[in-house]
Amino acid sequence: MLRYTLRRLLLAIPTLLVISFVIFALLDLAPNDPTANLPTTIPPEVREQIRLSLGLGEPFLIRYLKWLYQFFVNEPLNLLQSAFGIEIGDASERLRLRSWTTRSPIVDLIVERAPQTLTVVGLGYLTGILIALPIGIISAYRKYSWFDQIGTLVSMIGFSVPTFFTGLLLIIIFSVNLNWLPSIYDTSLRVTDWGSFTAQLKQMAMPVAVLGLYNAAQISRFMRASMLENFGQDYVRTARAKGMSEHVVIFVHVLRNSLIPVVTVIALGVPQVFGGAIITEQIFRINGLGELLISGIQSADIPLVQTLTFIFAVLIVTFNLIADILYGILDPRIRYE
Amino acid sequence: MSELDLIAPRADEAAEPAALDQAHRSLWSDVRRQFLRHPGALVGMIVLAAIVLIVLAGPYLWTVSPDRINPRIANRGMSLDHPLGTDNLGRDLFAQVMAGGRVSLAVGISAMLIAVTLGTTIGVLAGFFRRLDGILMRMTELFLALPILPLLLVIILLFRDVLRDLFGPSAGIFLLIVFVIGITSWMQTARVVRAEVLGVKERDFVLAARSIGARPYKIIFRHILPNVLSPIMVSGTLGVASAIIIESALSFLGLGFPPDFPTWGRLLYDGANYMTLNPSRVIWPGLAISLTVLSVNFIGDGLRDALDPRLRS
């Protein structure tokens, strides 16, 4: 297991390098001029200086290696320093990844935006899982019952209707018509007392519901399929034959085994949820990571977009790895090597 | 067909005297029967056919131009003159939804064709030629690890203007979106096709074909491809749904089609700003996307069940 983990970790390095190169090259070689949006009154010499100050004077490979060095060495060192106060090397001399539009370090922007995304997306995903598991279990246990039929239909709808439509629909119903919930997420809200706590709950209700429904639809399908597969196994018949109660059969025998593939699916879904948050954040005007990415794209802030996109890729690779290792730990039948 | 006949007895040969009273059953009539028994697939088929019919034939019957501006009737609700209401410039929403549907469906189908062609080619090559397997599958895994939505947004932003200059404003963006969706959604097809090819490749009829000296491309087109057609069809169907969703998501984020070239996603994006004033601008395009995707997904589900002989009753 350890050897497998190590090998996978080592294999992740070239994968990430290739992806980082693809992302960097794509953004860098595209026909795009960062000074194009500046006023036309700026003379060409100044324009050239601006380009040089943005680091565009050097050859492509040097810029890529510099970016890589900043991403993998400088920024982690900075994080280490600001989090624990451990200083390695000279922090003031360290070059940081900076956004072109705000000129502030990108990591600071991310640290500023991440909490909003994590609370909304995290809660949405958690809600989705909590709804999906019981639905999947009951649907599988009472296969083809009315509950199962309706559950399958609802999950098909939840899976097919795009989140940007459910989100807008919820806004129309609960904000425009009923006026119960705010349609815009206020990130400056601080939870200090009961009133601000309910306000926070109210503004989180719709985004969490949208993400929760969408994820519940997908996970409940997996849960149902996985339970059904296990119900047909011999050990279930054995358990029933030796007089185990239905309760024990379902929750001790079948559920534990059925959760193995579902847990990996849940782990695999985490990065996709972050991707999906780009849309949800746009609907409810949450200024999280997805909003940061979209505003970066719209203002052609190349370093910001490169870094954020690469972080998304790191998330995908990491959670793929976690899912595979979890599978090996949870399922004793799987032996890597 | 002669090689196929060796392993798959013809329907008339299979019809032994005892079964004479039964109509003979071919693979596809079985699939059709099974498909029509799936209630979701049947309803999905009818709904999709209705949507396609309205979108294609509707503009000939409802001759109001989707881009005729008339500010005096702006932001109207549903009425006889304008069945779905009008937008903030007084354009007829019904005509716009039909025009948008044509583009959305065209994007969905063309992007699916690219993705399925690419996925099938890569899957067949990886499954059939052992030397290519390693590199092609690593490439597939690499593509699966790419953050698709951010990358799509970035690609469209960066190459929009270039393609617009090359092919004109509407054709350029259409080609770009179809192309980028196509080259970023072939991976699942490739994996499924490869797995199927690995199985089919070891079957005796392939060995027989090989032993009479058939060339690899002949074996692939005559023996392998017809036998892996079912997963390709299923992933193609589901691919249309996901391509429509991706296109509308891109348009919804403001990085898809331009405002004068409406798709369902673009209509939703434009309508979202007038949501409080005129909710029908959000509801109709959104409903169109949802119904289309839902019915396509149901059809895909039914097709998968119908093509799986283990589930056949």
Image (cartoon, coloured by chain):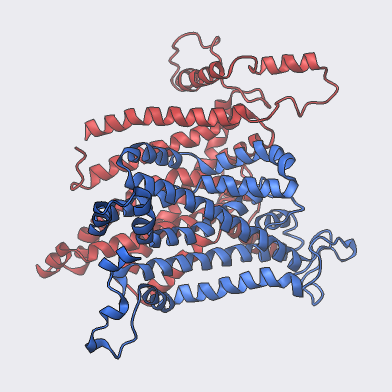
Residue B279: x percent and y percent? 71, 64
The quadrant of the rendering that contains the C terminus of chain A is top left
Count of numbered tags: 0
Residue at left offset 26%, top offset 62%: A229
Residue A13: x percent and y percent? 38, 27
Residue B231: x percent and y percent? 39, 59
Camera-side residue: A12 or B76?
A: A12
Q: Is residue B122 left or right of residue A108?
A: left
For chain B, the rendered hue is blue
Residue lying farthest to the left in this orientation: A242
Q: Is residue A111 visible?
A: no
Residue at left offset 60%, top offset 27%: A28
Residue lying farthest to the right in this orientation: B72
Q: Is residue A176 left or right of residue B295?
A: right
Q: Decide: is A12 above or below A147.
A: above
Q: Quadrant of residue A136?
A: bottom left
Q: Decide: is A43 above or below A6.
A: above
Camera-side residue: A54 or A22?
A: A22
Q: Quadrant of residue B212?
A: bottom left
Q: Is residue B236 left or right of residue B10?
A: right
Which chain: red? Answer: A
Q: Decide: is B242 above or below A322.
A: below
Residue at left offset 63%, top offset 30%: A30
Residue lying farthest to the front in this orientation: B212
Residue A185: x percent and y percent? 63, 47
The quadrant of the rendering that contains the N terminus of chain A is top left
Q: Is residue B112 visible?
A: yes
